Image (spheres, rainbow, N blue to C red):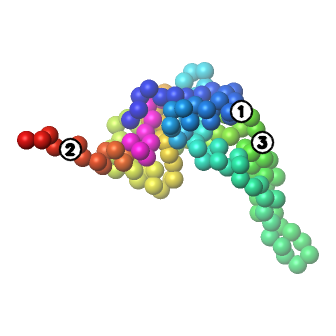
Amino acid sequence: MTTDVVSVTPDTPVDRIARLMGERDISGLPVVDDTGQVVGIVTDLDLIARNARLGPPAYFQLLDGRIPLETPGHYRRRLRHMLGGLARDVMTEDVVTIGPDEDVETLATLMEKRKVNPVPVVETGRMVGIVSRADVVRLMAPEPSPAK
């Protein structure tokens, strides 16, 4: 777990987030409010999605009619995600977190099942660290034995 966590606020510009992620070689940044509570997360995938092609709202063609497969609100959120300039526009609000006492197996299962990276470590509502896939992989690599 990394305890020296780089975080941003909801008003941080997206270009600043991209610079921080590049400079620090990290895959995501937690978004925290004034009290230090995690309110979102911006990952490298969120930034990559901004450069993807935005298709029209999905629908199902039935005879002469069209049945929308997403709500207008969902389409507006996709647009805001692609065009917005602040962390609040591109962040994922439903943040998956883990407690500091959880074991690696629980963390790995969470990361694999929920497809999340990184995962903020939260204790009593406040962020105390963050764990990435790279951290889990490092745990798998044994330390070399000292030479005899």
Quadrant occupied by the N terminus: top left
Amino acid type shown at disc 1: Leu
Q: Quadrant of residue 91?
A: top right
On the image, numbered disc 3 is attached to which residue? 83
Which of marks 3 and 2 precedes in the sequence? 3
Which residue is identified by label 2?
Answer: 144
Disc nearer the start of the sequence (2/1): 1
Determine the residue located farthest toward the left in the rendered image: 148
Image point (60%, 48%), residue name: 45
- In this view, the mark in front (2 or 1): 2
> Which one is nearer the viewer's eye here, 34 or 23?
23
Residue that numbered label 1 is attached to = 86
Can you say which quadrant of the picture contains the C terminus? Answer: top left
| Location of residue 104 in the rendering, given as x and y in whole percent from the top left corner | 34, 46
Q: Which label sits in the foreground, 2 or 3?
A: 2
The residue lying toward the viewer, choosing from 143 and 34, is 143
User: Residue placed at 65% from the left, 48% from the top?
Assistant: 48
Q: In the structure shown, which secondary structural element does the residue marked by tag 2 occupy?
A: loop
Residue 39 at what x, y percent from top left? 60, 33
Near mark 1 (Cα within 10 A), the count class, few <14, some 14-19 or many ≥20, is some
Answer with left or right where residue 116 lies relative to residue 49: left
The answer to whether residue 134 is magenta is yes
On the image, the x and y values in percent for residue 44 come to 58, 44
Secondary element under disc 1, as helix, strand or loop, is loop
Report, in whole angstroms, how far the alpha carbon at label 2 lies from the one at label 1: 44 Å
Magenta stretch in the rendered image = 127-135
Callout 3 environment at 10 Å: few (<14), some (14 to 19), or many (20+)?
Answer: few
The residue type indicated by label 2 comes to Pro
